[in-house]
Amino acid sequence: MPPKEDRRLRVGVLGCGPIAQAAHFEACTKARNADLYAICDVADDLRDRMAATHAPTTSYNDYDKMLADPQLEAVIIATSDAFHVPAALRALQAGKHVLCEKPLAVNIDEAETLRAAVKSSGCTLQVGHMKRYDAGLQAAKAFIDGPMGQMVALKAWYCDNTHRYAMTDAVQPLMVTSKNARKPSENPKADLDRYYMLAHGSHLVDTARYFAGEIKAVDARLLNRAGIRCWFVDVEFANGTLGHLDLTVAVRMDWHEGFQIYGAQGSILGKTYNPWYYKSSEVDIFHESDGSTHRVLGADGHFYRRQLEGFADTILNDTPQTGADIEDGIASVRAMVAIAQSVRSGQPVTLAEVSGAL
């Protein structure tokens, strides 16, 4: 791990559930420019156990009290999706920077309420699309923005698999739960179409936008057969690039995620691994100019730590934001709503015309 720098961002993590345990606590303790200053959860038993394990400077059972702490500089929102926007608004109003887990929101209207709050606060808000910190994807992005020239087409796929938990249980810490944990008023998994799109589709949509830019319209189909949900989405990008997205949960094979891009002066083929392996994507970049293929090793695959370091660099050193910002977060929610509406109507949907929720 990189050595700790003298000036480090003091971070508080809201929520001590699975995503905090699997990713954010460790990211804070390992980051070169951030510290796990505080944790907050209403479940006393869970919070106390996480405090004993990860040793924050302090802990809270009340979010407003944590936000009132003058030593706290930034908050990671690691809660259920329904709590993201209210928690982010309170943090921004308290003058704290925000790294919010994806998706930013569950509907367009609430996502857009954050835009004015970010602007008026003067704080940084970043959405936790950590795949932007995958060295393989970053190498692909550099090629796209440079020698590849005009993009012609993008295909991307994100296919969760039936064996994922057998595989990830071997590498993740044992998740600690509490009957006292705060839960949203509605069960997020009551509507699996919606749940899978928010949980997994948000990754796929952001990857597509990271590479090809703004999405203008989508034409989506959904088949639910044999316990498998499969979305095929034809995408029209604002720059004219043709796109096709495949979101499938869950395939009867290994984790299957990746992308293929055709450009004027080269092509890219990427294979992405289950994120909990912390292994950078294998990305083959073909240069038409000399007929060669290049692949970055990406030895440092801790996407969550690298994400936090990028977030902290923006705040501490005023470096350009490299993660997903408020506009990226809103655009991803808008795209997911458009996909859901296209499935229901059987017609193409223009993103600028959509509103409401999935």
Image: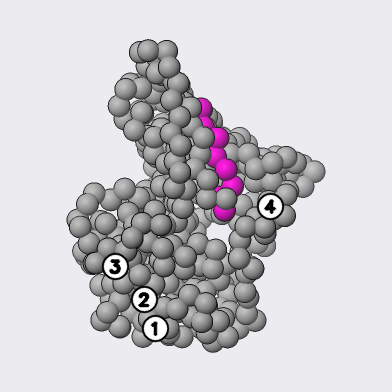
Q: Residue at x 49, y 80 (%)?
A: 51
Tag 1 residue: 58
Indicate the amino acid at tag 1.
Thr
Earlier in the chain: of badge 2 and badge 3, it is 3
Indicate the amino acid at tag 2.
Tyr
Task: Determine whether 123 is above or below 324 in the image.
Answer: below
Which residue range is magenta in the image? 269-276
Earlier in the chain: of badge 1 and badge 3, it is 3
Q: Residue at x 45, y 44 (%)?
A: 299
Pointer 2 and pointer 3: residues touching (CB < 8 Å)? no
Q: Is residue 271 magenta?
A: yes
Tag 2 residue: 37
Q: Is residue 350 visible?
A: no
Earlier in the chain: of badge 1 and badge 4, it is 1
Tag 4 residue: 167
Numbered disc 1: secondary structure: strand
Numbered disc 2: secondary structure: strand
